Image (spheres, helix red, strand yellow):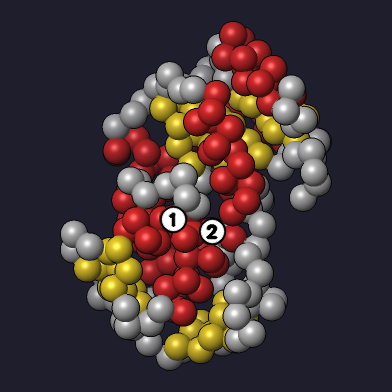
Amino acid sequence: MTNNPNVLVVDDEKSLRDFVRKNLEVRGYKVLTASNGLEAMALFNTERVDLVILDIMMPHLDGLETARRIRQSSIVPIIILTALGEESDKVRAFDFGADDYLTKPFGVGELLGRIKAVLRRARWSEPSTPEERIVRGEICADLSRHEVTVRDEVLELTPTEFNLLVYLMKNTGKVLPHRAILQHVWGPEYGEEPEYLRVYIGRLRQKIEVDPLHPRYLYTERGIGYRFDG
């Protein structure tokens, strides 16, 4: 990723687009703007985009469908920016491929913090120990290649999914609290977003478990956090 990321801001409110664009450009970001999902997809398919900021409620093509279409071909970070603030709305956005969620109204500092966090997570983490491969049962995580295989099949994982799985595998047998996982994988800005973990753990179970409803590896410790058993 370059030192000056390209950010695509998509919102049908011109005043909000201009507000976000001006605050990002003054900090060195390059900004593209679109007023709906169709315009956004046209730009996304022709320009280099490092981050997408999407409103949900837009004409022609809403933000969730736009996120879904982007996810069909890219793991670029997506931040949903919307007035819909219920937990069910957040979970639905994550299910459509969002990486983060910011509820309107929001402060510039909060927006900039989330942008920095998702761009940081979009980079594959370097191995923190000399250990290059972690093997737990039928799962092998190759840290140097940023690759996970399950039953000899390579998984398609986003950087966040990879970093979450590796963190859990490194702590096999330990019950990890929600806050500890969020702050290690998502960053110090996080800690009160358990719905993020529910969605991402659910994604990982779909990818690594033979029967996601009866997991062998990823266990929920109700009210506390999660535990990986190998």
In the orientation shown, which residue stands out farthest toward the left?
222
Looking at numbered disc 2 in the image, what kind of residue is underneath it? Answer: Thr
Q: Is residue 38 visible?
A: no
Q: Quadrant of residue 208?
A: bottom left
Image height of 165 relative to 48, above or below: below
Residue 216, image x and y in percent?
31, 81
Question: As rendered, which of 90 and 120 lies closer to the eye?
Answer: 120
Residue of label 1: 183
Q: Residues within 10 Å of mark 2 (few under 14, many from 20)?
A: many
Q: Residue 160 shows which numbered tag? A: 2
Q: Residue 155 shows which numbered tag? A: none
Q: Residues within 10 Å of mark 1 (few under 14, many from 20)?
A: some
Residue 60, image x and y in percent?
56, 20
Earlier in the chain: of badge 1 and badge 2, it is 2
Image height of 23 relative to 149, above or below: above
Taking the spot 61% from the left edge, 10% from the top edge, the residue there is 14
- Left or right: residue 86 compared with residue 104: left
